Amino acid sequence: MPEGDTIFRAASTLHRALAGQRVTEFSSVFPKLTRVETDSGVAGRSVESVEARGKWLLMHLSGDLILLTHMLMNGSWHIYRPGERWKRRRDDMRIVIGTPKMIAVAFTIQVAEFHTAASLARRRVFNQLGPSLLAEEFDVAGAAGRLRLQPDAEVGTALLRQSVVAGIGNVYKSEVCFACGVNPFRRVHSLSVAETACLIGTARTFLQMNVAPSSGEPMVTYTGMRRTTRRVDPAEALWVYARRGDPCRKCGAAIESRKQGIDARTTFWCPVCQPEPAWGEAAATPARGEPGGKH
């Protein structure tokens, strides 16, 4: 599934390609979107900006019209020049937004809605988003406090709750817990203040690492490579995710995995670097440092 870094990079790419341009073509397989085109017109408006909020992408058009999309598991946005051949099947197309210079195509996106600023503020789930980890102004201490408001949740489950912070997906959940030496099946109430700060701060650092210009190809879809270890070898890009049975990159123990939460998302961890805390000692367990530090 695309995570916050992928959506941020896709939004940045779309903004560079479309912002300031007039929409000359709009089509969609979604009747609710085409009805807006028929009733009030999408073509003829200008693209004012494109932004990401967590895993949501917002395209702001002139006249207070906002296209809200979510990629869910397999969605992606592509940018093409007029006449350029698409890299996905036409049957996978969900939205086309054309300008004189560029064409943006949304493939296999399942959630797509037009909003005004007022209706967007009322949009359930979206209006409950926590602070975006990639927001320019982000308060680590404040977000860590929001995490502590989920005391009975397992850490791995709480990190995925977009109402806590927006942008963490299943890959980063496992990677962040490893980097901070926190067992993802611990309860949030067992975390120290330092551990909660480490989890939030490391999540922001990891996402920022993967939206830098050098972090991948300029045209980003959800298949863009993700890196948390800072190692050059692509085979060593991640600490624990999808590495069940492989040796831990820190201690050599076999990486373990199991399903977690009501959605049964697979979580990966090192049983040595991320041990279950001893009874009564959980609250005193110190954080083990930032990415690349001592673990």
Image (tube, rainbow, N blue to C red):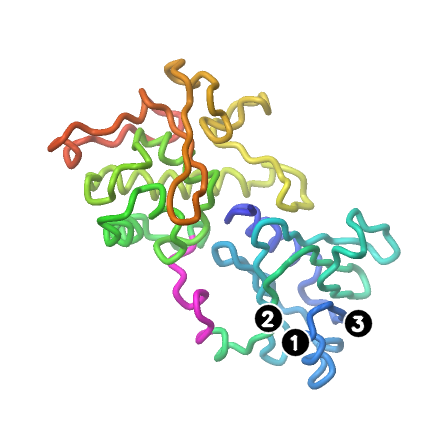
For residue 24, which numbered disc appears in the image? 3
For residue 32, which numbered disc appears in the image? 1
**Distance Cα–Cα, label 2 vs label 1:** 8 Å
Residue 151 to residue 20: above or below: above
Q: Is 266 included in the stretch rendered in magenta?
A: no
Residue 96 to residue 183: above or below: below
Judging from the image, what secondary structure is the residue with disc 3 in? loop
The magenta stretch is 121-132
**Distance Cα–Cα, label 3 vs label 2:** 19 Å
Query: Is disc 2 in contact with disc 1, using a CB cutoff of under 8 Å?
Result: yes
Judging from the image, what secondary structure is the residue with disc 1 in? helix
Which residue matches tag 2? 113
- Disc 3 vs disc 2: which is toward the camera? 2
The C terminus appears in which quarter of the rendering? top left
First of labels 3, 2 by sequence position:
3
Residue type pointed to by label 2:
Glu
- Disc 2 vs disc 1: which is toward the camera? 1
Q: Main secondary structure of the magenta part?
A: loop
**Distance Cα–Cα, label 1 vs label 3:** 19 Å
35 left or right, relative to 64 = right
